[in-house]
Image: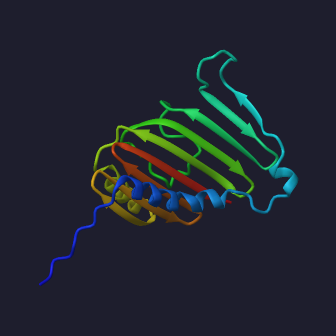
Amino acid sequence: MMALPSRHVDAPRLRRIASVLLLPTLLFLSGCDQKADDRFRKPIARSGAGLDNEAEENVTIETASRTVEIMSGGGGWPSGIPSEVPPFLDGSISSVARTASAEGMSWSITLGDITSDAVKHYETQLGEHGFHTSSMIVGNGGSVTGQNGNISIAVVANSGNATISVALKN
């Protein structure tokens, strides 16, 4: 019996896979049906911090068709994410970006200090919450995607860091 060769996925390939998984979410919320005038309108940016030289904690960008809020981490699992999506309890949240548009809502959550089995454990949690999942676990990272009705989720992790994208389609 012939042994199957093992497949090693390096960091650049994992980043390409992550890009492929996150691209549908971004395209979903890109607003392809908006008028050209709206796409080129100058955004309005507001900040929760003063105008000194310190780093901003929260920034909100508003355009005619969507609002994007970028928040620094430390606040726990973001509010507003549908209750069907189980919180990712491993690691620490470093930033959250929330986008609202006519097409729906999306959240992009960046985490650090995750354990090597976090993606596999989260796939199990997604299944327990009714998501149909697909995963690729590689070494200390990997990816999992899930679909539950109008909710899509993608998790990509590598070397102790992870990005979670949640999209809620109207």
Q: Quadrant of the C terminus?
A: bottom right
Identify which residue, 85 or 3, lies in the foreground. 3
What residue sits 22% from the left and 72% below the top?
5
Q: Identify which residue is drawn at 85% across, 58% down.
A: 35
- Is residue 169 something one can see in this rendering? no
Task: Single out the residue that lies furthest toward the right.
Answer: 37
In percent of width and height, residue 128 lies at 38, 60
Judge left or right: residue 47 versus residue 55: right
Left or right of residue 158, residue 49 in this image: right
**Depth check, front residue: 74 or 116:** 116
Q: Residue furthest top?
A: 52
Left or right of 121 on screen, residue 3: left
Query: Residue 104 at what x, y percent from top left?
Result: 68, 55
Total marks in image: 0
Please state the horizontal and vertical placement of residue 158, each as a whole percent of the image: 36, 49
**Compared to 50, does 127 lie above or below?**
below
In this view, which residue lies farthest toward the bottom?
1
Residue name at image x 30 percent, y 58 percent? 138
Q: Residue at x 47, y 63 (%)?
A: 146
Q: Quadrant of residue 161?
A: top left
Residue 159 seen from this side: yes
Residue closest to the far left: 1
Q: Quick check: 116 above or below 136?
A: above
The image's colour scheme reads rainbow
Specify the quadrant that holds the N terminus: bottom left
The spot of residue 47 in percent (x, y) is 69, 27
Query: Is 129 located above or below residue 38 in the figure?
Result: below
